[in-house]
Image (cartoon, rainbow, N blue to C red):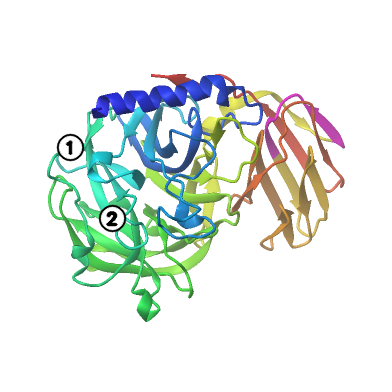
């Protein structure tokens, strides 16, 4: 079966599950980006090009139950087909595009593994326009045996048409990066390419871990393009060492310029963190001066960030942890427009486009308000030192004198006169933006219709917008 047939078969298979199961599941989020059906996770290949936001994402076209290709995150954490946690299957890149970040057109599967050549998983990667003006997708290629993500991954490139709909590898080009680049130095957990530019030059960063035998640190490694096609790369060295000990690796690293500073994002097998500093890519030097959490929840992971035509820096992450789903599992976070405060704290806000989902007037809650649907936006204001709760169905945000408690996790509050939370509720998930800085992503006991929203203190002000999220998806 050729690529055209495999991609068509996988796409139709996904749509069939969507029609029969996923579209009928009342707990599936609506205005968060999601695949038509089946298991999805990391946002990959995100790019703004010719008026469209393109979203590609890791997708298992065969099931919504198992993390195909993610055995290294399961109980045994051993990459062997003989292990009981082995999931088998394949991972493709799903694909959709949007002009406004709200309405998405699902497109055919973009990248499908070359199983005849031992590739079964198309893992995390990026999409860019190379210096010849051709769209390229660069990603970590994983196999069952000889392309282990722990110790022997390689990096591949595919080439796209000018609409970014049809993608193909070129014969004799792959792999474009192997361990030979490191001149004998062993890098473990080497994966997740992300492309950026500085001073007109193209670079890639990848995550990894230095030699385990020497107790090596988790690192981000830097590479420079050697040709315009982005098929040849030069190893520049270790750009960043994670400052804490005993970290497995720096997964899914992104780096982006915000103002005159650079923000490095890493997913360190735990809550996503950021580091702010100065970058000199030519000399492989990143000097960071501020660090913090992007999101303290373990439900948010694997960020991808892009600039758009408005020169905004937009970031997405994968949201996982859903229970009792039917025909689907996993979504993307809302896009988060990132910037920096004067003291270099990362600021995050939902783009203004999402105001278009508001249906009707804002409602200020006195005690209790009953919403007809489970797609809501809440503005919660309170003074420093306030104590109380805001309840959404069976889900509670606990406000304490110096912190919040969500999903039994304490999130410290900075000392300031007043605090503002922006909570986006979408059936079975909630993203809470805390003073426009740190966020928290929570799994909800699902809210679908006639959900009560209440507060227990007059010192807490709650405004509610009902969101109309129907009809946001079409198919190519």
One can see residue 95 in this view: yes
User: Which percent across, then down, holds residue 351?
Assistant: 51, 37
In the image, is 465 to the left or to the right of 163?
A: right
Q: Nearer the viewer, residue 204 or 9?
A: 9
Q: For the C terminus, give its image quadrant.
A: top left
Magenta range: 366-378
One can see residue 107 in this view: no
Please give the residue where the numbered disc 1 appears in the rendered image.
133
Please tell me whether residue 199 is drawn above or below residue 461 in the rendered image.
Answer: below
Please tell me whether residue 141 is drawn above or below residue 159 in the rendered image.
Answer: below
Q: Is residue 71 magenta?
A: no
In the image, is 462 to the left or to the right of 89?
A: right
Residue furthest bottom as drawn = 214
Q: Secondary structure of the magenta portion, mostly? A: strand
Secondary structure under badge 1? loop
Please give the residue where the numbered disc 2 appears in the rendered image.
146
Identified at 30% across, 47% down, the residue is: 139
């Amino acid at each position: 079966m050729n690529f055209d047939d495999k991609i068509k078969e996988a796409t139709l298979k996904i749509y069939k599950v969507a029609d029969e199961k996923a579209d009928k599941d009342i707990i599936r989020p609506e205005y968060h980006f999601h695949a038509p059906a089946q298991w999805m996770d990391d946002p990959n290949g995100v790019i703004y090009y010719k008026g469209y936001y393109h979203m590609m994402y890791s997708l298992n076209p065969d099931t919504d139950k198992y993390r195909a290709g993610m055995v290294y995150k399961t109980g045994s954490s051993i990459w062997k087909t003989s292990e009981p946690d082995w999931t088998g299957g394949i991972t493709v890149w799903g694909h959709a595009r949007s002009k406004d970040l709200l309405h998405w057109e699902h497109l055919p599967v973009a990248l499908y593994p070359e199983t005849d050549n031992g590739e079964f998983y198309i893992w995390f990667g990026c999409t860019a326009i190379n210096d010849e003006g051709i769209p390229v997708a660069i990603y970590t290629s994983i196999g069952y045996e000889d392309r282990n993500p722990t110790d022997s991954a390689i990096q591949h490139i595919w080439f796209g048409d000018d609409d970014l709909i049809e993608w193909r590898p070129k014969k004799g080009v792959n792999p474009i990066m192997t361990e030979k680049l490191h001149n004998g130095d062993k890098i473990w957990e080497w994966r997740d390419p992300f492309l950026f530019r500085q001073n007109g030059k193209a670079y890639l960063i990848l995550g990894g871990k230095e030699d385990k035998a020497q107790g090596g640190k988790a690192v981000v490694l830097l590479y420079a393009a050697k040709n315009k096609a982005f098929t040849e790369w030069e190893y520049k060295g270790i750009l960043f060492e994670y400052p804490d000990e005993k970290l497995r690796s720096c997964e899914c690293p992104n780096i982006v310029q915000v103002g005159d500073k650079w923000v490095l994002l890493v997913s360190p097998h735990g809550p996503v963190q950021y580091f702010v500093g100065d970058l000199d890519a030519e000399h492989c030097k990143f000097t960071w001066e501020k660090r913090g959490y992007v999101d303290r929840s373990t439900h948010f992971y694997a960020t991808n960030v892009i600039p758009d035509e408005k020169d905004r820096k937009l970031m997405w992450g994968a949201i996982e942890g859903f229970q009792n789903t039917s025909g689907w599992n996993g979504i993307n976070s809302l896009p988060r427009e990132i910037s920096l405060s004067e003291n270099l704290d990362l600021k995050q806000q939902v783009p203004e486009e999402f105001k278009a989902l508001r249906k009707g007037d804002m409602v200020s809650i006195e005690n209790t308000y009953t919403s007809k649907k489970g797609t809501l936006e809440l503005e919660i204001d309170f003074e420093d030192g306030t104590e109380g709760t805001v309840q959404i169905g069976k889900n509670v945000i606990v406000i304490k004198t110096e912190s919040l408690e969500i999903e039994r996790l304490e999130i410290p509050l900075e000392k300031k006169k007043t605090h503002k939370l922006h909570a986006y509720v979408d059936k079975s998930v909630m993203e809470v933006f805390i003073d426009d800085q740190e966020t928290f992503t929570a799994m909800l006991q699902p809210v679908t219709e006639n959900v009560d929203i209440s507060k227990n203190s007059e010192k807490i002000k709650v405004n509610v917008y009902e969101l109309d999220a129907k009809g946001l998806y079409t198919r190519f």
